[in-house]
Image (tube, grey):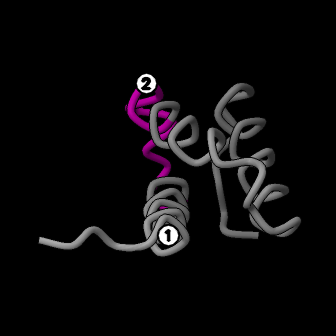
Amino acid sequence: MDREPIETRIQHRLTLLEYALCDNLHLREPDGVQALIQKIAVHDAILSDEDRQYALSAQRILDEQIPYDGS
């Protein structure tokens, strides 16, 4: 079975992160959201600037336990 390209897996993880934040899962399951952010962050060298900024913003939202409204 062939693995998906890393870029595809990263985009999937970013989508999962967005769903988790929109559902405010970071308030209920911070460790799971942190693990997801870390799986994205290890690929910092190949992230687009936009994706890198989104991951950094997600980390701040998690760290400060800010309810997320999707904006």
- Image-quadrant location for residue 16: bottom left
Quadrant (top left, top right, bottom left, bottom right) of the N terminus: bottom left
Looking at the image, tell me whether mark 1 or mark 2 is earlier in sequence order.
1
Given the image, on which type of amino acid does mark 1 rest?
Answer: Thr
> In front: 68, or 45?
45
34 in relation to 11, above or below: above
Secondary-structure class at tag 1: helix
6 in relation to 59, above or below: below
Numbered label tally: 2
For disc 1, the marked residue is 15
For disc 2, the marked residue is 31
Which residue: 85% across, 56% down? Answer: 53
7 in relation to 63, above or below: below
Q: As drawn, which residue projects farthest toward the front?
A: 2
Given the image, on which type of amino acid does mark 2 rest?
Answer: Asp
Percent across and percent down for residue 34 are: 52, 31
Percent across and percent down for residue 7 are: 55, 71
Percent across and percent down for residue 17 are: 51, 56
Magenta segment, which residues? 22-33
Quadrant (top left, top right, bottom left, bottom right) of the C terminus: bottom right
Q: Are marks 1 and 2 in contact (CB under 8 Å)?
A: no
Mark number, residue 65: none
Secondary-structure class at tag 2: helix
Magenta span main SS: helix
Residue 49 sits inside the magenta stretch: no
Which residue: 52% across, 63% down? Answer: 10
Which residue: 49% across, 49% down? Answer: 24
Task: Count residues near mark 2 (Cα–Cα under 10 Å), then give few for <14, some for 14-19, many for 20+.
Answer: few
